Amino acid sequence: AQKVTQAQTEISVVEKEDVTLDCVYETRDTTYYLFWYKQPPSGELVFLIRRNSFDEQNEISGRYSWNFQKSTSSFNFTITASQVVDSAVYFCALSEASGGSEKLVFGKGMKLTVNP
Amino acid sequence: DAGITQSPRHKVTETGTPVTLRCHQTENHRYMYWYRQDPGHGLRLIHYSYGVKDTDKGEVSDGYSVSRSKTEDFLLTLESATSSQTSVYFCAISDLGGGAYGYTFGSGTRLTVV
């Protein structure tokens, strides 16, 4: 069965620090998809990135970067030079291609607080 | 932004009463999902739909039922609300299957059962 573990429940940093959010997943499928979502204090869920299991290239988008390593079943998210606006709960999610259920399984989330 | 709305946004209800939450989309997406969000548990799937009248259970479906009589509407019903169902409920939609493309979420419904 698919599973996502976000071992860190809460992190607090000072503005401009770099921070890495860990995500470890379990799946028996060879084809799967990984996601990160952001939930700011306002409560909405915002899509950040999608990665399929065949694409291990790291990705950078501004201050955000993602490191996908199949060897360690990890899909970690790094925020460089954090800002107060990055304060949010971040969710990692996984979906398996087989089964046809089209379901996403989420980790329990990690609350990031960036202090000025 | 994708057209997805949830109603009501907030609701307080008494234990034992029936409650229906509505998710409405204007995107004509095939897939619709109901999740609940609780501290320490993240987001957990309650039920989902892969077409009109086609629904299936998620991991926390006990005490909930759903219906989808039209593409645009996906209703979540708590037949007899309990305090353990106090939660924030999110609806999500996906066109080609959330598994590959992810979801677009509604704004959530905060339900309190007293």
Image: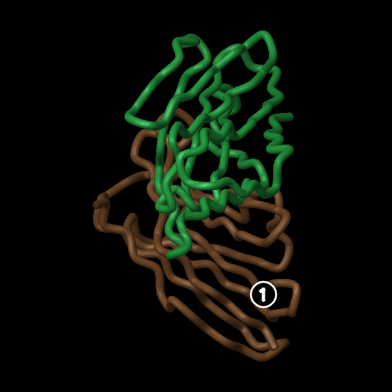
On the image, which quarter does residue B14 sit in?
A: bottom right
Identify by letter the chain in brown. Answer: B
- B21 left or right of A27? left
In this view, B114 is above or below A17: below
Residue in the picture at 65% in, 49% down: B58
Q: Which residue is mark 1?
A: B86
Write down the colour of chain A.
green
Characterize the local packing of mark 1: few (<14), some (14-19) or many (20 or more) Cα atoms within 10 angstroms: some
Can residue B83 be seen at all in this image of the molecule? yes
One can see residue B55 in this view: no
Residue B90, horizontal then vertical, whole percent: 50, 60
Circle 1: residue type: Thr
Query: Could you tell me residue A57's position as x and y percent?
Result: 45, 10
| Mark 1 secondary-structure assignment | loop
Residue in front for this viewpoint, A5 or A30: A5
Give above or below for B4 relative to A66: below
Q: Position of residue B17 (x, y in %)?
A: 65, 88
The colour scheme applied to this rendered structure is by chain
Compared to residue A56, the image places residue A116 above or below, namely below
Q: Position of residue A11 (x, y in %)?
A: 64, 46
Q: Residue at x 71, y 53 (%)?
A: B41
Instruction: Identify which residue is drawn at 48% across, 42% down.
Output: A37
